[in-house]
Image (spheres, rainbow, N blue to C red):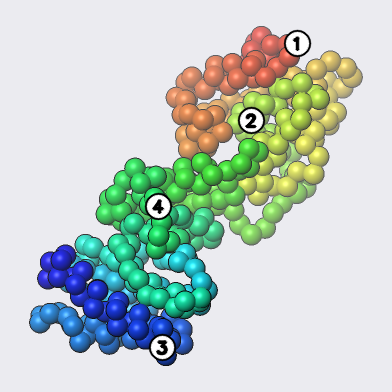
């Protein structure tokens, strides 16, 4: 069966299913999918059989040689719905062309079909990233990715997630950060369900986290009255480390951090707190993953160039003082 023959088969099946939708209707998604199998079985060419007992997580729902059909049913008057997981872990490797067969039961019931990759227009980045489809999508998600659906489907999961993360970040509003999108359970951006309070952490961990936040968020060097100067630092600790900070100044300008090495009051508290954790900052500059550096700095910087780049960014935010002239000058 070639593509033209398969399209004719879908035309026949879609027409018959559309008549059912407009008359008796379908009870639910299972009823629609099973009826689709019955209809297809009457029209498939010799040599092909419709499997009436597939694996419940198989993708697509119906496989016919090189062609597959993913069935979607909604009671609403909408051509948009959530589809399968991007992992497609149970994908039939023999299927080269996937079509979406969609039953809209709300409003004026109707059954239509279209190539699956043309309908995928969004990915929901919840616990398990899932495609979202719209039968009349004007632009496919894969066009935005710059790869074909076939290329994306063949990628290992960690490569798929690179595209998903970039897409999710492109949709963030100013001041927003991703919660987590992990490649695997050991990914640095995967949080446990428990969130810890910064004030309850041991001093050594506080110093490490302050150093990481300082490296990733050079906006901390903005003047004291600058609005939101600590937002990125607080969001980093929450979204990457699962640590909740009630008072942002606890990280860099409170007396508890600025006066640790010298209790004399006065001077630039931010500078004094950064000087106190220079060793931890060195560690953070050399150990933070490239992916995290790229998210917060907008580009990947080689490890040996990171300190100079960070000091330059601090200088660009500071007013009335030069961090690069004050830090790492022992």
Is residue 15 shown above or below 139?
below
- Which percent across, then down, holds residue 322? 69, 11
Query: Can you say which quadrant of the picture contains the N terminus?
Result: bottom left
Who comes first in sequence, dot 4 or dot 2?
4
Q: Residue at x 68, y 36 (%)?
A: 233
Mark 3 or 4, nearer chain start? 3
Mark 1 crowd level (few <14, some 14–19, many ≥20, 10 Å Cα): few
Estimate the spatial distance between the alpha carbons at disc 3 and disc 4, rounded to whole Å: 30 Å
Q: Which residue is mark 2?
A: 217
Sequence-first tag of 3 and 1 = 3
Instruction: Specify few, some or many for label 2: CA neighbours under 10 Å numbering under 14, 14-19, or 20 or more.
Output: many
Measured Cα–Cα span from mark 4 to mark 2: 38 Å
Q: Sequence order check: which comes first, mark 2 or mark 1?
A: 2
Label 2 or label 3, whichever comes before in sequence order: 3
Bin the neighbour count of mark 3 within 10 Å (Cα to Cα): few under 14, some 14-19, many 20 and up. Answer: few
Q: How much space separates mark 3 and mark 1, taking CA atoms? A: 76 Å
Q: Residue at x 21, y 62 (%)?
A: 96
- Closest to the camera, between mark 3 and mark 1, is 3
The residue shown at (50%, 33%) is: 294
> Which is in the foreground here, disc 2 or disc 3?
3
Residue pictured at 68% horizontal, 15% vertical: 323
Q: Is residue 321 above or below residue 184?
A: above
Could you give the CA–CA distance between mark 2 and mark 1, rounded to whole angstroms? 19 Å
The residue that disc 4 covers is 138
**In the depicted structure, whether residue 231 falls above or below residue 133:** above
Residue pointed to by mark 3: 23
Rendered-image quadrant of the C terminus:
top right
Left or right of 57 on screen, residue 154: left
């Amino acid at each position: 069966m070639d593509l033209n023959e398969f399209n004719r088969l879908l035309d026949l099946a879609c027409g018959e299913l559309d008549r059912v939708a407009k008359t008796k209707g379908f009870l639910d998604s299972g009823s629609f999918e099973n009826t689709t199998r019955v209809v297809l079985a009457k029209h498939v060419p010799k040599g092909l059989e419709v499997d009436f007992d597939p694996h419940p997580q198989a993708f697509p729902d119906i496989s016919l040689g090189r062609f597959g059909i993913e069935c979607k049913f909604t009671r609403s008057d909408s051509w948009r719905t959530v589809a399968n997981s991007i992992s497609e872990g149970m994908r039939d490797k023999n299927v080269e062309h996937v079509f979406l067969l969609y039953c809209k039961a709300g409003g004026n019931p109707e059954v239509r079909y279209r190539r699956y990759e043309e309908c995928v227009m969004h990915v929901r980045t919840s616990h398990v990233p899932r495609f979202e489809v719209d039968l009349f999508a004007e632009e496919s998600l894969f066009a935005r990715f710059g790869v074909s659906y076939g290329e994306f489907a063949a990628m290992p999961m960690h490569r798929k997630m690179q595209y998903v993360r970039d897409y999710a970040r492109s949709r963030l509003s100013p001041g927003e950060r991703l919660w987590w999108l992990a490649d695997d359970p050991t990914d640095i951006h995967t949080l446990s369900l428990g969130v810890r309070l910064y004030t309850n952490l041991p001093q050594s961990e506080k110093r490490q986290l302050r150093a990481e936040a300082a490296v990733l968020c050079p906006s901390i060097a903005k003047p004291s009255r600058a609005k939101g100067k600590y937002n990125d630092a607080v969001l980093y600790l929450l979204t990457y480390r699962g640590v909740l900070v009630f008072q942002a100044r606890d990280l860099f300008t409170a007396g508890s951090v600025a006066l640790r090495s010298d209790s004399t009051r006065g001077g630039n508290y931010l500078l004094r707190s950064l000087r106190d954790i220079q060793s931890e900052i060195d560690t953070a500059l050399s150990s933070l993953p490239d992916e995290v550096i790229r998210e917060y700095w907008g580009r990947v910087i080689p490890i040996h160039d990171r300190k100079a780049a960070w000091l330059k960014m601090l200088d660009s935010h500071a007013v009335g003082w030069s961090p690069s002239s004050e830090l790492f000058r022992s």
